Amino acid sequence: MAISMSEPKRIRDLLGAVMLPTIAVVGLNLINAAIARDETYPGKLIKFVVPLTPGSPIDALARLTEPHLKARLGQSIVVENRAGGGGTIATKAVATAAPDGYTLLFTGAIHTLAPVLFKSLDYDPVKDFAPVATVGSGSWVLVVAPSVPAKSIQELVAYAKANPGKLNWGYGVNTGPQLFGEMFKAATGIQVADISYRGGAQVLPDLLAGRIQMNFATTSTLLPLIRDEKLRALAVTSEARSPDLPDVPTMAEVGLPRLTRGFWGGLLAPPGTPTAIVSKLNTEINRAVKSTEMTASLAKLGFEPKISSPREFGALIVDEIDVWSEAAKAAGIKPE
């Protein structure tokens, strides 16, 4: 039987009439399943992957956040430390994890330092993550050994310029304090001897013994030594003075406003994580951070509450990468 030229079109129309409703139903079912999944989140254990060793400030912040978020979500959370590779191993693992909200990266400034310090990252710190929420922030403090005859930033700069290379500055390699110190040297024009250590904690024994004369570290880490007058605090890097060190000026107050910078901790999710899940996590984390209990706990660790939307957190990450890149370039630090 011959088929007219109009017959193929009629067949296509018939097939379309049969298939379109089926396709629509399947699509609707998929959408409904996705909505149901997001509404029932979380339905199983959530994992915080920390790219640093146990006991580090970010690890402490993650473990502080865990019980507060657990209580609000009604689901268990486990903190898993995966140190190594300057934080890149754990970060890559989360970037490639299932985007279902059950594997999250709890990280800090190490996330924005990576593109500055490492030549070939196999992930993009901006594009390969969905920002969820920040939790806390803190500042660094510049201290000198009691043997240094300087009681202010101005006196330190004058002494360092009069004695180029005499002061030893200690820092943990590939850390925020290292790049911040480079920014400080560039801004003040001083020359000091750079002494690197595997981590910031390893600087303290030599600092107390007088072999190191300058150090940037977290306020909470150095506070007991400052109060015992074993170290002298000259300036904090926060926007406002530290409640724990009310007599110590900010960098802006001593004429270095561009050195207002600190550290933070927050959660990132794999790319493609549903907006509803990100929004739910952000809401509950922000509520937890605002609570009296968590605010008090943050203060004990030397952190201040830091509330943000996913968009604001994303903007912070982009800004940090730009700042650290500029600092590294000025200091002649090249990615390895």
Image: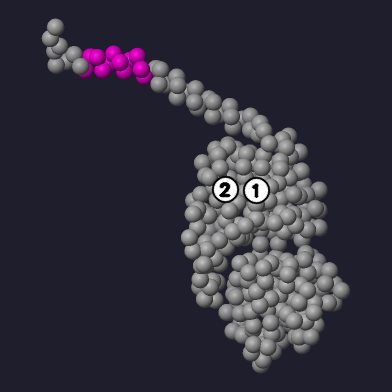
Q: Identify which residue is drawn at 53% across, 55% down.
A: 125
Residue 161 appearing in the image: no
- The amino acid type found where label 2 is placed reads Ala
State the image coordinates of residue 81 (x, y, percent, origin top left): 68, 51
**What is the basis of the colouring in this image?**
one colour
- List x then y, in percent, for residue 176: 63, 66
Q: Is residue 263 above or below residue 129?
A: below
Report the Cα–Cα distance between label 1 and label 2. 9 Å
Q: Position of residue 258 (x, y in %)?
A: 60, 72
Q: Quadrant of residue 235?
A: bottom right
Q: Is residue 213 above or below residue 119?
A: below
The quadrant in which residue 143 appears is: bottom right
Q: Main secondary structure of the magenta part?
A: helix
Judging depth in this view, the residue of 98 and 306 nearest the camera is: 98
Q: Position of residue 186 (x, y in %)?
A: 57, 79
Residue depicted at x 36% and y 19% = 20
Callout 1 amino acid: Val
Residue nearest the viewer, comparing 55 with 236: 55
| Start-end of magenta stretch | 9-20
Question: Residue 308 versus residue 27: which sits nearer the camera?
Answer: 27
Quadrant showing the N terminus: top left
Q: Quadrant of residue 170?
A: bottom right
Marks 1 and 2 close (CB-CB < 8 Å) = yes
Residue 43 lies in the magenta stretch: no
Which label is found at residue 131? none
Residue 10 on the magenta segment: yes
Question: For mark 2, what is the residue?
Answer: 93
**17 relative to 112, above or below:** above
Q: Residue at x 56, y 29 (%)?
A: 35
